[in-house]
Image (cartoon, rainbow, N blue to C red):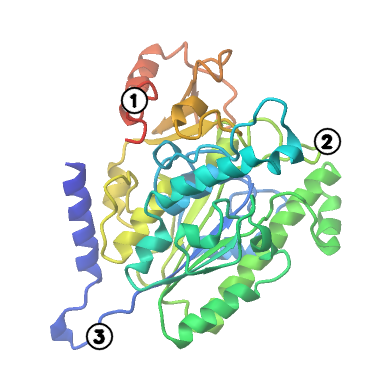
Amino acid sequence: MRLFASLLSTLTFVAALAITPSQGAEPAPRPNIVLIVSDDHGWGDYSFMGHAHVRTPNLDRLANESLTFRHGYVPSSLCCPSLASIITGLYPHQHKITSNDPPVPPGAAGKNFHKSGAFLDGRETMNRHLEAVPTLPRLLAKEGYRSLQTGKWWQGDYRRGGFTAGMTRGQRHGDEGLEIGRKTMKPIYDFIDQAKQEPTPFFVWYAPLMPHDPHTPPERLLTKYKSVAPTEHVAKYWAMIEWFDETVGSLLNHLDEQGLRENTIVIYLADNGWIQNPDAARYAAKSKQSQYDGGVRTPLMIRWPGRVAPRMADELASSIDIAPTLLAALGQRPTHDMQGVNLIDADAVKSRTAIFGECFTHNAVDLNHPAANLRWRWMIEGEWKLIVPDATNEPEAKLELYDLAKDPEEKQNLATVHSERVARLVGKLNAWWDPDKKAEGK
């Protein structure tokens, strides 16, 4: 039934966009795609999301011009698995990139580990996991697209993700790719200009190391926030967000200047959340690496002028929906393993009853068996969020249940109060993915 509904939804969507031959018009050109991914960015840290001090005028403009899901989520609160899910449309337990780094051998630590053969071998295994599944660049290449990787990229050389061009050559975070945004936007502009001249539809992956630490904003922005932030650490983080926002404005303006606005789909989200520790240059509890909304919630925007009506949406959305949405925009069906929905299809979004996620250890325990690295599974149904800890990796943790409408900061655990609801939701969570079953990739 799910496959039939997905097919029917796709056919309906394509039919709505089609121009009949009797109209005497050429088919609409294939849309360009620009995917903007901010890095370690708290879900509420935008002007349009109500922050009292952070200014994001360009993201505000994009949000107002987009179908904007204020309750968007990523399945995992770590950069590497989250980015892998964005580009594949699969959950971490499906693509098997669950952690940021490989297992640490006994006696190895820090920089010595990152230089070791065990580390390099582990990263190669992770890279091969990505090569084993379809990615957006590979799927789009079949439709004649050229693609560019910039910014964060963990899975080796950009070509291993299927990109036809890119900045990253193979180091852990993204090496030369990390210059995008902080130092230059020229690689993107050059790529767009070349694609326009050919002409060829293009896909741009813009995932700068922003506002991710090191928090080194321009002094003009830091000065602006020092007077209103509780500490300098918070001021630096806020200033980094506005600096990132400026780069988004530059990118959107370039699309306008090149006459590409109308035929370009722009998608925005953050790879995971962040709550700045006011007393140290690191994140606070209940954010990055956590199972809470501070780690997994993000606004998610889709701008496609003339095709997608702008509105602020309160329905749930997930980063695993991005790939199916883009494929549907091209008249294509999602791959068999994709579980996301077409976010442009309002009926498909409304018919979904829950979204799911999973958080894993920072360093994997076993690179080939996702369940070995599991810390928590979570799900949201309506206003209720269930969190189930893994007995092995989180032996002291308790099952948690929150009413997000009344308790958005997840402070009051209601699991013991609503035992029947918990039992029902656990059954639904297990039906989605039960780590005790052998078929982990299904």
Q: Residue at x 36, y 29 (%)?
A: 433
First of labels 3, 2 by sequence position: 3
Q: Name the kind of residue labelled 3 in the image.
A: Glu
Which mark is in front, 3 or 1? 1
Asked whether 298 or 181 is in front, the reply is: 181
Residue named by callout 2 = 279
Q: Is residue 113 left or right of residue 315?
A: right
Amino acid at circle 1: Lys
Pick whichever, 131 or 382, lies toward us.
131
Which percent across, then down, holds residue 396? 58, 13
> Identity of the amino acid at label 2?
Asp
Q: Which residue is mark 3?
A: 26
Give the CA distance from mark 3 to mark 1: 51 Å
Q: Which one is earlier in the sequence, the residue at label 2 or at label 1?
A: 2
Residue at the spot of label 1: 438
Using the image as rendered, state which of residue 415 and residue 378 is in the foreground.
378
Q: Secondary structure at mark 1?
A: loop
SS under mark 3 = loop
Element class at badge 2 = loop
Picture layout, residue 265 above or below residue 207: below
Q: Position of residue 281 (x, y in %)?
A: 80, 41
Cα distance between the residues tagged 2 and 1: 44 Å
